[in-house]
Amino acid sequence: SKTTLSLTVLQRSHWALAVSAVVLYNTAESLVWRMDEHHIDKAIVASIHGILTNVHDSNVELAFQTKPYLERLIPFFTLNPTYPGWEEELRCCAEVLELRGIRLYPQYHGYRLTDPESVELIGAVTPLGW
């Protein structure tokens, strides 16, 4: 029988491992194939590009890549509360791109979860029910 697995793409101490995994399984199709190999039914996925580049571009790419596999892949988008326009990015990801969760990277984007901007973002996401 298949199981549900939640994946965290990166942790600071696993940078090299995460990068090599991205190179080997860098498409939604190849990730689903790998999940089948290991009897994994569903996985939460996020884009590594949102850590290092523009979050909007990475969120659009994630939505495009995962759309054919939404029964297997649960896309979590990246938001940065210090990014001007994060409110519009939240609306776009939730309503237009139909992504289903949020991933924050405070250690890479240079903020704390207790900062006023973070608290405001969390307040805006909470009513979405994720």
Image (tube, grey):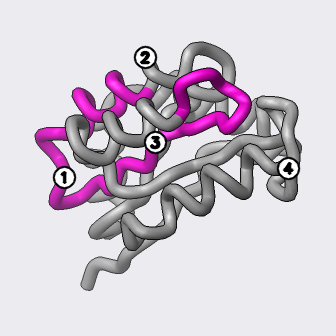
**Of residues 72 and 105, the one drawn nearer to the viewer in this rendering:** 105
- For label 4, the crowd category at 10 Å Cα-Cα, with few meaning under 14, some 14 to 19 and many 20 or more, is few
Mark 2 or 3 closer to N-term?
2
Q: CA distance from mark 3 to mark 4?
A: 20 Å
Which disc number belongs to residue 115? 4
Name the residue located 59 percent from the left edge and 62 percent from the top edge: 123
Left or right of 119 in this view: 34:
left
- For label 1, the crowd category at 10 Å Cα-Cα, with few meaning under 14, some 14 to 19 and many 20 or more, is some
Mark 1 or 2 closer to N-term?
2
The number of numbered discs placed on residues in the rendered structure image is: 4
Work out which quarter of the rendered image holds the C terminus and state it.
bottom left
Q: Is residue 129 above or below residue 8?
A: below
Q: CA distance from mark 1 to mark 3?
A: 14 Å
Mark 3 or 4 closer to N-term?
3
- For label 2, the crowd category at 10 Å Cα-Cα, with few meaning under 14, some 14 to 19 and many 20 or more, is few
Q: CA distance from mark 2 to mark 3?
A: 11 Å
Query: Amino acid type of disc 1?
Result: Leu
Query: Amino acid type of disc 3?
Result: Phe
Q: Which residue is mark 3?
A: 77
Does the CB distance between marks 4 and 1 fall below 8 Å? no
> In the rendering, at what x and y percent does residue 67 appear?
17, 39
Left or right of 15 in this view: 10:
left
Mark 4 or 1 closer to N-term?
1
**Which mark lies nearer to you, 4 or 2?**
4
Residue range corresponding to the magenta coloring: 59-86
Q: CA distance from mark 1 to mark 2?
A: 19 Å
Q: Is residue 19 above or below residue 75?
A: above
Q: Which residue is mark 1?
A: 70
